[in-house]
Amino acid sequence: MKLHWGHGIAIFYTVFVLTLVVVVVKSTTFDNSLVTEEYYQRDINYQQEYDRRLNSDQLATKVSLEKVAGQYRVIFPEKMAQGATGTLHFYRPSSAKDDRTVAVSVDQAGGMNLSLAGLKPGRYRAILEWSSGGKDYLDEFYLMV
């Protein structure tokens, strides 16, 4: 059987429609979750976030994240550790369902052990929002679980 131009047009439109159907089906399974649900409010309050980051940058001894024996530990500056309060948010860029927030609890040694139990393996951004001595601070760390 010889193909003529009518067959070519029919094949072209059939392939086009099938491709379009595949793209539509794939797009319905895509996770398009936002970084944060309150993105507009966060954008309005960006100046406060910038100020907290600036406060952290101006510290003589900065907050650090260390990995010891397979466990992460946040070390606070010595003079500011006692009385530090705040939250630590584990943000996973690939899935908002895997995000988690924990309260800051500083031990006698001036640090905080991070419990990674329940976190799926992958890359996380740990966003530490804390305050001590009447000032607010914000630090970010990247970690692999």
Image: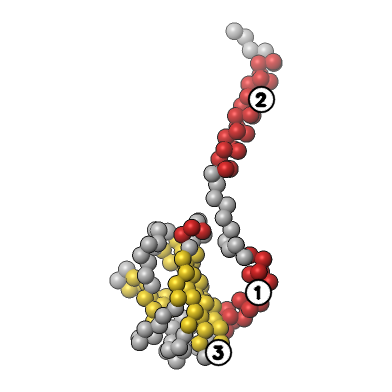
The Cα–Cα distance between marks 3 and 2, rounded to whole angstroms, is 67 Å
Q: Is residue 67 or residue 111 the one in the foreground?
A: 111
Can you say whether 30 is above or below 87 in the image?
above
Residue type at mark 1 is Asn
Give percent across and percent down for residue 37: 60, 62
Q: Residue at x 59, y 7 (%)?
A: 1
Crowd tier of the residue under label 3, counting other residues whose Cα lies within 10 Å: few below 14, some 14–19, many 20 or above: few
Q: Which residue is mark 2?
A: 13
Give percent across and percent down for residue 23: 59, 38
Q: Which residue is mark 3?
A: 134
The Cα–Cα distance between marks 1 and 3, rounded to whole angstroms, is 19 Å
Q: Residue furthest left?
A: 69
Q: Residue at x 47, y 69 (%)?
A: 101
Q: Secondary structure at mark 3?
A: loop
Q: Which residue is mark 1?
A: 45
**Could you tell which of marks 3 and 2 lies nearer the N-terminus?**
2
